[in-house]
Image (cartoon, rainbow, N blue to C red):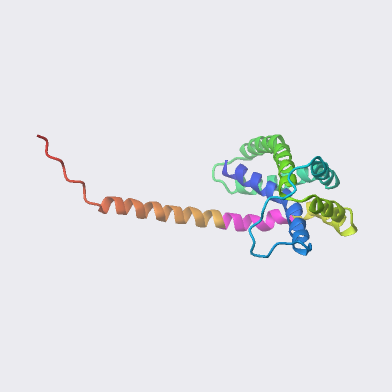
Amino acid sequence: MRTFVSAVFFAAALIATPFTVHAQTTATTAATAPAADAAPQLAPDGVTPEKVELTHKLLTIMDINKMLKTTVDASMQMAAQSLHDTPGMSDDDIKDALGMETDMLNKYMPKMVDAMAQVYPKVFTEQELKDMVAFYETPTGKAVLQKMPLVMKEAGPVMQPVLTEMKNDMLARMNDLIKKKMNEAKAKPAPAAQKVG
C-alpha cells in the first residue's frame, strides 16, 4: 500500500511539474509580478469560460493522456523495484500487485487530472494561461513535452535509492521515538489510589 501511495503522488507531481515550472516563470517575468516573498493568491479575474477553454487547450497541447500513460509506467517501475526489495514477495505476488496498482492508477489518475483542470482557472489569470499555451507551442515548449517522458524514465532509477534511504531513515526515527515514549511512560509514577468512603 505504501508503494501504491508513493507512486500516485510521484505521478501526480510529475504531471503537475511542467505546468508549475512555466507558470512560475511567467508570473515572475510579468510586469505585474508580485514580490518574491509575497504569498501566492488566487487569480483576481476568477473562473471564466475563456479560462476553462484555455485550460483544456493546454491539456490537449500537452497530450495529457500520453503523459499520463508515461507517468503511470514510470511509477510502476519504481513500485516494482520496491516490491522486489520486500521480503517474502514472489514473482507472482509482484505481478499481481503491480497489476492491481496499474488498474488503480489508470482508474484514478484521469480523475486527478480533471481535478487539476478545475484548479488552474482559479489560480492562474487568463494572460498566464495564454502564456503557457503559447510556450508549449514554441520549439522549446514542444521539446519539453517531447522529452518529459525521458525525464520520467530517468527519474525512476535515480529517485528509488533516495526514496528507500528516506523510508529507512523515517522508520528508524519512528522506532526511536516510540521507544522513547514507552520509556517515558514506564518512568512515570503510578497515580495515587483514591480512598473510597
At which x and y percent is residue 157? 69, 55
Q: Where's residue 33, x and y in %? A: 74, 62
Which one is in front, 44 or 150? 44
Q: Is residue 17 above or below residue 195?
A: below
x%, y% of residue 141? 85, 56
Compared across the picture, whether 93 is left or right of 135 comes to left
The residue that appears at 12% across and 39% down in the rendered structure is: 195
Report the residue at 89% width, 57% height from top: 138
Residue 50 shown in magenta = no
In the rendered view, tell whether residue 103 sits above or below residue 63.
above
> Where is residue 169 shown, x and y percent of the image?
51, 57
Image point (61%, 48%), residue name: 82
- Split into 4 quadrants, where in the image is the C terminus? top left
Residue 51 in the figure: left or right of residue 159: right
Q: Quadrant of the N terminus?
A: top right
Residue at 56 percent of width and 46 percent of height: 86
Which quadrant would residue 177 be assigned to in this image?
Answer: bottom left
- Magenta region, main secondary structure: helix
**134 lies left or right of 3:** right
Number of labelled discs?
Answer: 0
The outermost residue toward the left is 197
155 in the magenta segment: yes
- Residue 10's place in the image compared with 139, above or below, is above
Q: Nearer the viewer, residue 163 or 146?
A: 146
Per the rendered image, the range of residues in magenta is: 153-165
Q: Nearer the viewer, residue 53 or 22?
A: 53
